[in-house]
Image (tube, rainbow, N blue to C red):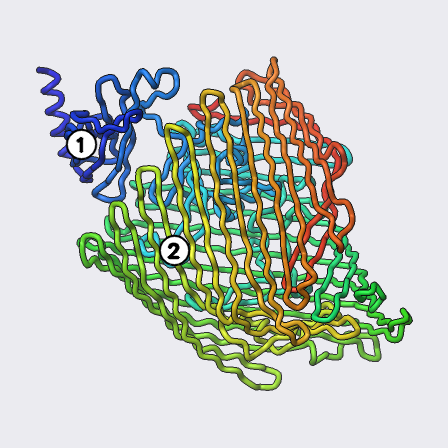
Amino acid sequence: MRKLLFLFCSLLFAGAIYSQSITVKGQIADTSEKKPLSNAVVAILSKDSVLLKHTRTGEDGRFTLTATGEGPFIMLVTYPKFADFMDQLAPKEPVLDLGGINLIKKSVLLEEVIVSRKIGAIRMRGDTLEFKADSFAVREGANVEELLKKLPGLQVNKNGEITAQGEKVQKVLVDGEEFFSDDPAVVTQNLRADAIDNVQVFDKKSDQAAFTGIDDGEKTKTINLTLKEDRKKGLFGRVKIAGGIPGYFENEAMINLFKGKRKMAAYGTMSNTGKAGLNWEDQEKFGGGSDMEFNEEEGYFFSYNEGDEFNTWGGRYNGEGLPKAWNAGAHYSNKWDNDKKNLNGSYQFYKQDVLNEGTTTSQFILPDTLYYNDQRRKTFSQNIRHQAGGFYDLKLDSLSNIKITVKANRTNAINQSDYLSRSLSEERDLVNEQQRQLFSKGQKDFLNARAIWRKQFAKKGRTLSVNFDQSYNANETEGQLLAINEFFNNGGIKYRTDTTDQFKENYQQSNAIGGKFTYTEPISKKWFIVADYGYRVNNSKSLRSSFNKDNAGKYAELDSLFSSNYAFDFNTHSAGLNFRHNGTKLVASFGSGISFADFRQTDLVTDTAYKYNFTNFFPRANIRFKMGAQRSLSLNYNGNTRQPNLQQLQPVRENTDPLNIQVGNPDLKQEFRHNINFNFNEYKVLSGRYMYINSGINLVDNAISSSTNLDNEGKRTSMFINMDGNYNYYSSAGLWMQFKKISMNVNSYLFYNGGKNNNLVNGVKNTNNYSNMGLRLGVGKSKEKKYNINLEFGPQLTQSKSSVRPDVITRFWTASTELNGMIYLPHEFEISNELSYNYRQKTDVFGEDRNVWLWNAYVAKKFWKNKNGELRFSMNDILNQNIGFQRNASSNFISENTYLSLRRYWLMSFIWNFNRSPGGK
């Protein structure tokens, strides 16, 4: 009687705090016999385990259950002689179809699986792929980066860059919040793996798309790390002090203070081993390059580098050269007042010096001949950057909020380069020689402010949002160019010497302001319509000045051939209409946007103007079909136009390399891109098998290509032109299988990429077909506190063929084999080895042996009560064979680059992982 009274009171209480209604549907079946289970009990409980509603399955095993209460909910399924099934439900839709739920007989379960609030190793929640961190074995004290390397479908390269299903990961969040997300390596290399509950991989949409549910084509491959509950409060961090021979150091420190939803953190690094340096999106973080391109849909310019060595902002370290890096940062975020107020901000400082030396050997393919170029270079770059950014999100009431985001950075850069090169004919006769020196220094500033107001109405699905943003870009550089070019006749006799000695000043600035209105309206229970309108104005200017020496030896004579002064004014109106279907198994959207832009380019020297008017269309369609609880398929199409950037349009010669002149083309037209993508994911819980397929094709109409002319002195002049018929494709597939009984997993990864490019070479149309395919096979075995071993092998084939010389085919194999092992010894000792063999096939052009063995190892001893202290002796490149090496194949040339790389050194390290959180060790 008391139990019934308690149950009755509990139900009354649940009704009193009603805030959400949920309807759950599904079918219960026997895993082994694949038969439906009738009369199984299905119950929904509150998050405090209070019973809200229960029912029994019908003869076909199906059930439908509706309950009201305060989410998230817990679902419990019981049946005699079967293990209970329990899972947490946090639905975004009022109706949740779980598909088939398979129960396991207790006799089969025994020592293998216990289902009691336990989630599988891999889950798919809508568009999100989720990994249960504790299901993947890593060494004690491992960081997040080591955990990510264990996850199927994810790869982490030597520079810390992560790819997921073949796509580069650009952001790493913590508990869904920005946390040094502009520098993901700070998170992955300093947070401990044992603090992570789940790793979620998804395409992060823009704030606007996330609010309306309509895909606007703006996606960022993102990883979200959800922390374990006991790690969301307390003090934890990591300190590493390391030094070694010859003169290497690697010092890191990070401290985190979490209390509920308040997060504070700070970090600092000093290193010349490349492991605490800059990577990931550093080119973008340091302000990109020097040129500006117009985004036709949003109506703004962004900066990037387009082959102008003088305006190289760099800042990126990808293993080339010898680096020294000093980084520091601080972060604060908090939610309060029942999550109505959300503040997030960070500051980061970077300084990096890179010294590099190397060679480049190139083969250029022409319609009637070949020629070669050999180059030696020595470069030094220094980049110093300050960045600050954050946002404030305020819920004005239960149906509306406003979010203000601000980002700003300043970069100072110094670059110095020395080149010595020579060009050879097909018969290997000397054509020209060049000595060239470049020096530049500059400053780049960036500021962006954005505000978005969003309003939900009482009618579900009706929303209104207003977006306003402003951006400012400016960069200023100055420096010197000295080039001495010597030319030789067929007999190898020098007949002319040209000298270029110039001082250069460049200044570019862009100011933009704009706004956008978006309205959504439900037209049925599952169909919605989205309409938007935006306007943006952008004013930019670009000044390039080249000065020759006058009779007094001063750089005072303006060289008009390599100087320019332009102003750019852009006005853009855009509108869009899209439809969205939200179903239980099918989510789809389709529609199109259109923009009208008028562009005025004014030559301030000659007072002449070029006017352009563009009408651009942006069709898109997206379909995602949920084929079961752990299986999904998606198909996406996006069409967009790309306008020529400012450097491509300016009819100005660029001569930082006098033997390679680039010229703009004011008659360039826009290109249109069709982007099609297919994605499939499937995870079998019981067998522990995960499989994915990702493929796509990008077709380009009226592509912006190049016309290159090479004269008999070895000078190349390139101009941008439009060509039809360009495309590229990509595909990858992965399979990961886990064998729990023997603690082993097997994985395979297959990819095939390629395409076709068209250009002109000495006036002749050239079609280049290229492809790159590869396979990677791996096997891993582990035993807790005993060992962890992984073996991987992967061959790769690169091919390229040009129509101007079909008899000259570029084709070579590369392959790598890696064996990584960790052995745990008594008394808290551990030994780690990383051994790899890299094979690079010789070719007719590249005949040197580039095959290397790389061997890294360390011995470590853990100490203190909680084993959070560690002494480590490590050696990098024990065999001293590391060679900086890279091959490239393009439209009508192939090249091989060598560069300085970090070779043999050793380090003695002290590592302290401290933790003062409730679940810390």
For image coordinates 61% across by 78% down, the residue present is 651
Which mark is drawn over residue 595? none
Above or below, 245 against 205 in this view is above
Count residues near mark 1 (Cα–Cα under 10 Å), then give few for <14, some for 14-19, many for 20+. Answer: some
Kindly give the residue lying farthest to the top in the view shown: 826
| Amino acid type, callout 1 | Asp
Above or below, 700 against 116 in this view is below
Kindly give the residue lying farthest to the bottom in the view shown: 607
For image coordinates 27% across by 31% down, the residue present is 101
Q: Position of residue 52 (x, y in %)?
A: 17, 30
Q: Position of residue 459 (x, y in %)?
A: 18, 54
Q: Which residue is mark 1?
A: 60
Above or below, 296 against 261 in this view is below
Q: Position of residue 249 (x, y in %)?
A: 70, 36
Is the Cβ of the residue at disc 2 closer than 8 Å to that at disc 1? no
Element at badge 1? Answer: loop
Q: Is residue 820 visible?
A: yes
For image coordinates 55% across by 67% down, the residue present is 292
Left or right: where 144 falls relative to 176: right
Element at badge 2? Answer: strand
Kindly give the residue lying farthest to the front in the view shown: 807
Residue depth check, mark 2 versus mark 1: number of the one nearer the observer: 1
Which mark is drawn over residue 636? 2
Q: Position of residue 742 (x, y in %)?
A: 49, 21
Above or below, 438 against 502 in this view is above
Give the CA separation, mark 2 to mark 1: 36 Å
| Amino acid type, callout 2 | Asn
Left or right: where 681 falls relative to 443: left
